Image (tube, rainbow, N blue to C red):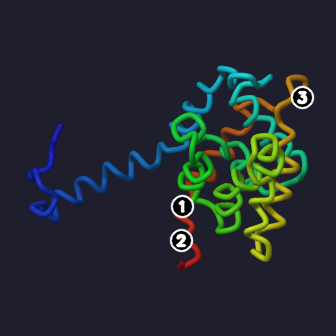
Amino acid sequence: MKKVSFTEMKKGTKKDYLFLDKHEKKFANKTADRILKFMSGLTETLEGYQVSRLEHSLQSATRAYKNGESEEMVVAALLHDIGDELAPMNHSEYAASILKPYVSEKTHWIVEKHGEFQMFYYAHHLGGNKNKRDEYKGHKYYKDTINFCENYDQKSFDPNYKSLPLEFFKPMVKRIFSRKPYSLITNK
């Protein structure tokens, strides 16, 4: 396999970077496949919960789908907790960063902030501030994030809920992650 000529980025040539760009684009085109593979492995039950991380995600996405949400929001509901596994202390930001190039500002903000908004349901039991989300009152996506948490996230821990399988969401994930980066579409 051909390799670049440099050992320091500043010594790379245009030819090197064109070569790498070609490989990066191929790699980026398989992002949806890597995400779906990762999601399919989240079958262990979260310690103490009645459902696995995968089942929680499927329930969230199924609820969003059945509520007539956009495909983008359904995929966001599916992936909103993808960061739990590798970034448990900032899982929301992790998930939002994965989605950011492919989703609207609104969807990105909802996923990024859902962890703080979700504290409404439990923080007071642990001596924390259940109203942390109130710091965002007046933000244009405040109510949307409350609705996301109420309708899709907080209620999706039910072992008896009949969620749609990951395979059902596969085409949606592939479509979202095959989009041009959102910033290129909106000129932001």
Q: Amino acid at mark 1?
A: Pro
- What x and y, as percent, mark residue 64? 83, 48
- What x and y, as percent, mark residue 113? 68, 58
Determine whether 97 is above or below 172 in the image: below
> Badge 3 is on which residue?
161
Residue located at (54% from left, 78% from top): 188
Mark linked to residue 36: none
Instruction: Give the mark, 3 or 1, whose residue is nearer the N terminus.
Output: 1
Gap between marks 3 and 1 measured at Cα: 32 Å
**Which secondary structure, mark 1?**
helix
Determine whether 30 is above or below 116 in the image: above
Gap between marks 1 and 2 measured at Cα: 7 Å
- Residue occupying the far front of the picture: 127
Along the horizontal axis of the image, is 98 left or right of 1?
right
Gap between marks 2 and 3 measured at Cα: 37 Å
Q: Are marks 1 and 2 in contact (CB under 8 Å)?
A: yes
Q: Amino acid at mark 2?
A: Ser
- What x and y, as percent, mark residue 101? 54, 61
How many marks are shown on the rendered structure? 3
**Which secondary structure, mark 2?**
helix
Q: Amino acid at mark 3?
A: Tyr
> Badge 1 is on which residue?
101
> Badge 2 is on which residue?
183
Instruction: Give the mark, 1 or 2, whose residue is nearer the N terminus.
Output: 1
Place residue 50 in its image quadrant: top right
Crowd around label 3: few <14 · some 14–19 · many ≥20 (10 Å): some
